[in-house]
Amino acid sequence: MEKSIYSAKYQQLCRLLRELRQEAGLTQVQVAERLGVPQSFVSKYESGERRLDLIELRHVAGALGTSVTNVIGRLDLS
């Protein structure tokens, strides 16, 4: 199992979170406001510069109007 934040699977999650934000019609600034964090937080997890833990992922999913279950269901983990 690859542990790097630069793994292909983690980059897939980053792309998916960006896509979900765009599908929701939200900017990085709007997501950041919903989370109560700086816009750079959103930029960093979307670009893969920052790794999210499970609790943060739950908050991000909620800010995007979805659930962790939906996010995971949309990942290709094969």
Image (tube, helix red, strand yellow):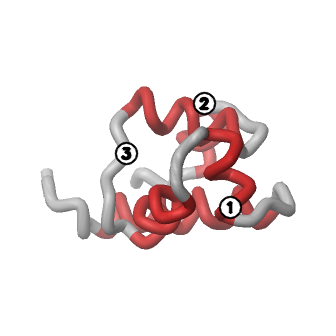
Q: Earlier in the sequence, mark 1 or mark 2?
A: 1
User: For the residue labelled by badge 2, is the local secondary structure a helix, a strand or a loop?
Assistant: helix
Question: Which residue shows up at 79% across the image and 60% down it?
Answer: 26
Vertical side of 24 occupied by 33: above or below: above
Find disc 3 in the rendering and name its residue.
52
Q: Nearer the viewer, mark 1 or mark 2?
A: 1
Question: Which residue shows up at 73% across the image and 37% down it?
Answer: 66
Find disc 2 in the rendering and name its residue.
69
Q: Earlier in the sequence, mark 3 or mark 1?
A: 1
Q: Quadrant of residue 71?
A: top right
Quadrant where the C terminus sits is bottom left
Q: How far apart in space, not on screen, are marks 3 and 2 (Cα)?
A: 15 Å
Numbered badge on residue 54: none
User: For the residue labelled by badge 3, is the local secondary structure a helix, a strand or a loop?
Assistant: loop
Contact, mark 3 vs mark 1 (Cβ under 8 Å):
no
Q: How far apart in space, not on screen, are marks 3 and 1 (Cα)?
A: 18 Å
